[in-house]
Image: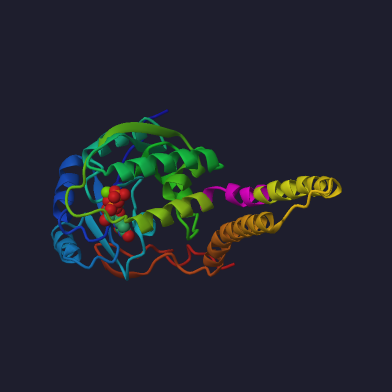
Amino acid sequence: MAERNLALLSVVTPMLDEEGTARTFYERVRAALDGLEWELVVVDDGSTDATPQILVELAEADPRLKLLTLSRNFGHQTAITAGLDHARGDAVVMIDADLQDPPELIPSMVEHWRAGSDVVYATRTAREGETPFKLATARWFYRLMGKLSDVPLQQDAGDFRLMDRVALDALLAMRERNRYIRGMTAWVGFTQTALPYRRDARHAGETKYPLRKMVRFALDAIASFSNIPLQLATLAGFACAALAFLAIPVAIVFRLAGEFVPGVTTTVIAVLLLGGIQLMAIGVIGEYVGRIYDEVKRRPLYVVRDRVNVVAAEDERERTPAW
Ligand code: UDP
Ligand code: MG
């Protein structure tokens, strides 16, 4: 295959309250991409600190920095989507702003792309500066996702990846609201290559993923890539029904043998057990129904308040098709 020619590389970054990192991040990207034609699309996801001012200042000094300000906090995955919608490159990299993902890795990603790979995702061989809790939950999460998901997902890969324009357009055609981007990039297929790297500690500030958001993220991921929880509810139902059927002859035998089953305790246990399982099953169904409701409302994924150095993606609105 002939080497691909890179006319423009887009780097897309979501930022929420990254005043301690924004400037350093920009400097490191600029240094790392020296010699390439590039644009840096930064999405300000409703920051309430000095991040917007810093970004406006940087964008006014360098037209390669495209700034998109959302009207409020829409969340990491949606902010990335907003950036991807506005990226114009032949190849597009998504990267976190906190410098946990080193921008210096981007040129090697580009090399893999030139050699014909459509999706180059960075896998973490080590993660610095994370709490044991985060490491453990992340490991369980990826293992569980691996078992549940309908498409093979990559282990230990975050959102840090490069995508070819064709693969990206396939990704952007998916306008679902519950977005699990790393799963969606696996779903589109094409040639995927892993690129191992060490994940650094956060440059400054704190994680923007408190436990609440992590749980939400995990539930979104599972619900958008697996229907197995729904099937588990059915299985639990069958298991209970089977138990009940087994219990009937047992009770009859006891009755005929003249042994009275006092009954109260067993009844209470059975009621609680069944009630619990039913509530759980309803809860699981509720998670899916809630997401269906979210999807059918067909709201736009995000609202842009301001743009610097960037024109509106021509189809920002049309990209959420009417039914
Ligand atoms: N982020 C965002 N909106 C959010 C949460 C996070 O744009 O609601 C950005 C954040 O600024 C960072 C990236 O998403 O650039 C990843 O977040 P973070 O580093 O806090 O997550 P972690 O690495 O701890 O999982
Ligand atoms: Mg981080």
Q: Position of residue 228 (x, y in %)?
A: 59, 47
**Residue 1 lies within the magenta run:** no
Could you tell whether 7 is left or right of 52 in the image? right
The answer to whether residue 220 is above or below residue 32 is below
Between residue 254 and residue 271, name the one nearer to us: 254
Point 21% across, 47% down: residue: 202
Quadrant assignment for the C terminus: bottom right
Can the viewer see residue 270 in this picture? yes
Q: 173 or 288, which is in the foreground?
A: 288
**Quarter that holds the N terminus:** top left
The residue depicted at 15 percent of the width and 62 percent of the height is 54
Q: Is residue 85 visible?
A: no
- Residue 86 figure quarter: bottom left
Magenta-highlighted residues? 224-235
- The percent position of residue 137, horizontal first and vertical second, equals 38, 44
Tag count: 0
Q: Is residue 242 above or below residue 156?
A: below
Q: Position of residue 97 (x, y in %)?
A: 24, 51
Q: Residue at x 68, y 51 (%)?
A: 237
